[in-house]
Image (spheres, grey):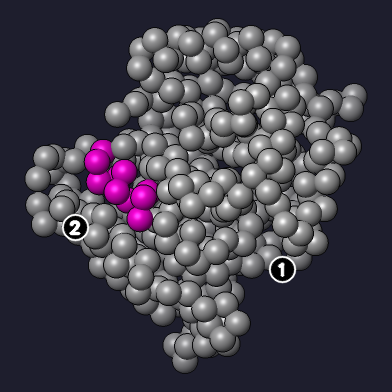
Amino acid sequence: MKDYEDFEIAIDPLRDGSYPVRIRTERGQEFRDRLILPTADARYQSFQYKLEYQELVTEDDIMAFGELLHETLFHGMIWGAFQAARVQAQARGNALRIRLSIEPDEVAVASLPWEFVADDAGLPLAIEHSFCRYIPRIDPIRALRVTSPEVVKVIITSALPSEVAIHYPLDLDAEIAGIRQSLQPLVDSRQIEMREVPHLTGLKLQRLLEEERPHIIHHIGHGTLNGDMGFLVLETDAGTRKDVSARQLGVLFRGSTVRLVVLNACKTSQVITHLLRGIAPALISANIPAVVGMQSSVLDQTGRMFAEAFYRALARGFPIDGCVAAGRKAIIAEGISHLDWGLATLYMRAPDGRIFTPRTP
């Protein structure tokens, strides 16, 4: 089981047509360079056009796009520092946690799907290493780890309003069963408590956060954007649709015991004009240590595959970074042309990705 060593890439606000970049390695080495976004590159525009008009995207298209992102992010001093840090980490049996630190106003940088970065051999870096997004905040970072003898409390929530289910059905039972199977050994050995809260409403969410004090929330459902604000599609008591904004969710989660939120719902990390108006970033700003969201729409089947692999890795004591990588691999096993492997986004402020260390059942 690998550990991750930090490789921080802090991207500062745009200045004179490029973004100043500050690099800091696990060993405290510091480097500086500049970054120019690839939006004017024909390869970038071709890939975005295919996505927008839902044309067939091939494995070669995705890897070419990933290599373009690699050229953009890793060049000059950044490339030299990354190569040296990677070799040193590998010598210790570790991988790198590539921590992208992005200012909340820099949406042009944050909206790029950096998780698709691939090396010149066409291999996604996010499989071997971790791509972790970091938002600078003043609030102290809450501890991610749940310390023994406390039992890790996992609550699986879901919402599928009747008018949404007609057009965008989800197999909720299959995903919940997959997660249960992945975590069952730790449930049996009383290291994890797990329960389900279907038909999630805003009031139900408030009560479970205050009364049950969970450590992990896994939500299955849909997300959407309205203007520049992200919304999670929840339900009313009557089972109809009730959209809850990223700002509302931040209010509900602030001060809670939650260490990790996994949002297996579309567009839960997508941003338009300001980073903190996206759902995942808003939860990070509410002092949740780690949030996994989706940058765009994902297929129900690949979402289930991601969730099952994620929790299998969590049950083995992997850090959250490794759990996300396991989820990506599960989707890639079906084919790299499944874009969904690169759409999962990990936001994390905690310095270490381990939420708990399971005892051998």
Identified at 24% across, 60% down, the residue is 181
Identified at 35% across, 55% down, the residue is 308
Q: Which mark is residue 150?
A: none
Q: What crowding class fits label 2: few (fewer than 14 Cα within 10 Å), some (14-19), or many (20 or more)?
A: some
Q: Position of residue 76 (x, y in %)?
A: 73, 12
- Type of amino acid under label 1: Asn
Identified at 55% across, 73% down, the residue is 233
Q: What crowding class fits label 1: few (fewer than 14 Cα within 10 Å), some (14-19), or many (20 or more)?
A: few
Position of the C terminus by quadrant: top left
What residue is pinned by disc 2? 184
216 lies left or right of 123: left
Q: Which residues are magenta?
A: 308-317
| Callout in the foreground (1, 2) | 2
Q: Position of residue 134 (x, y in %)?
A: 56, 36
Q: Position of residue 210 (x, y in %)?
A: 33, 64
Marks 2 and 1: in contact by CB < 8 Å?
no
- In front here: 334 or 271? 334
What residue is pinned by disc 1? 226
Magenta region, mostly helix, strand or loop? Answer: helix
Is residue 323 on the magenta stretch? no
